[in-house]
Amino acid sequence: MEQMAHPSSTPLLVAEIGNTTAMFAVFSGTDPIDSLQVATAALSSPEAVGELLQPLLARHSLAADAVISSVVPRAGEAAGRWLLDILPGRVLAVDSTLNLPFRISYDPPSALGADRLSLCARCCMLEEEAAVIALDIGTAITFDVLSADRSYLGGLIMPGLELMASALHERTAQLPRVEVSRPERLMGLSTADCIRSGVVWGCVLQVEGLVRKIRGWLRSEHGEGYARVVATGGRAPLIVSMMEMPPLLDPHAVSRGARYLFELNRITVS
């Protein structure tokens, strides 16, 4: 565990590779200045990665280093191999062996995914000294909790919106496959609308209920008086917009956290 690292002004390429989509962002300091989003399935080989990334890197020729936060091993390896060949600097992969800005307690530590490590690192950048509940609302929905003194206290994992909707279609005889979007009304007037409303509102209320439950657990079990909530992920804008008490929404939270981890580990990767 280490104190806040001062961000470098040198452009850094951050690869955030999720189960469904991948984001490649060029950071200058703590903010992205350019980005490219692709389907993770497109990262099938180093050559495929190169075809996708060359235009982005051509616009930012000063970017010499990269950090990769990947939950899809094959895609992460393909990106890493191409970046190692093309960049003159360092390529760092996020994992639990890095110098982290929080104390980790997980069994085994290596099973805590790069996305969750990066998101927790982003939460350590918050200036206020308070516990944090970190939400990543994507293909899966993860909750990770940090104490005010930046100890990792545990997490939860539940299926995301598309997984819920797909399960209804795949595990029943007649329910249709439905595109998940914001429902027009609470009570559906067609089967598709009923599924859409049930999945989306069910997810909103699950998230709100679990946040409330975790806050109570933090008070009773750990003596934490207040907990900040941070949300990210492809489906976070939809769910957050429907919550009664919306959390801080940061679409680039995982990438910001990965960038921070690169700064904390500059010496070890040089």
Image (cartoon, rainbow, N blue to C red):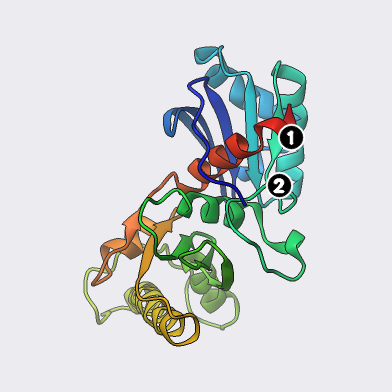
Q: Is residue 39 visible?
A: no
Label whose residue precedes the other's in the sequence (1 or 2): 2
Q: What type is the residue that disc 2 sits on?
A: Leu
Mark yes or no: residue 131 visible.
yes
Residue nearest the observer in this picture, 100 or 212: 100
Q: Residues within 10 Å of mark 1 (few under 14, many from 20)?
A: few
* Kind of element beneath mark 2: loop
Q: Is residue 129 left or right of residue 1?
A: left
Q: Is 6 or 29 nearer to us in this picture?
A: 6
Image location (x, y in percent) of residue 167: 56, 75
Closer to the camera in the image, 131 or 247: 131
Report the quarter where the C terminus lies: top right
Residue 207 lies, with reference to residue 38, above or below; the image says below
Relative image position of residue 186 (x, y in whole percent): 24, 79
Q: In x, y percent, where is residue 175?
A: 48, 79
Residue bearing the label numbered 1: 268
Q: Secondary structure at mark 1?
A: helix
The amino acid type of the residue labelled 1 equals Thr
| Residue wearing tag 2 | 98
Residue at 63% across, 61% down: 103
Q: Is 265 situated left or right of 46 in this image? A: left
| Circles 1, 2 touching at the beta carbon (< 8 Å) | yes
x and y, in percent, of residue 130 in the image: 39, 64
Residue 235 position by quadrant: bottom left
In 3D space, how far apart are the residues under numbered discs 1 and 2 (Cα atoms)?
9 Å
Q: Please tell me the numbered disc located at residue 185.
A: none
Judging depth in this view, the residue of 127 and 57 nearest the camera is 127
* Left or right, 171 with reference to 8: right
Count residues near mark 2 (Cα–Cα under 10 Å), then give few for <14, some for 14-19, many for 20+. some
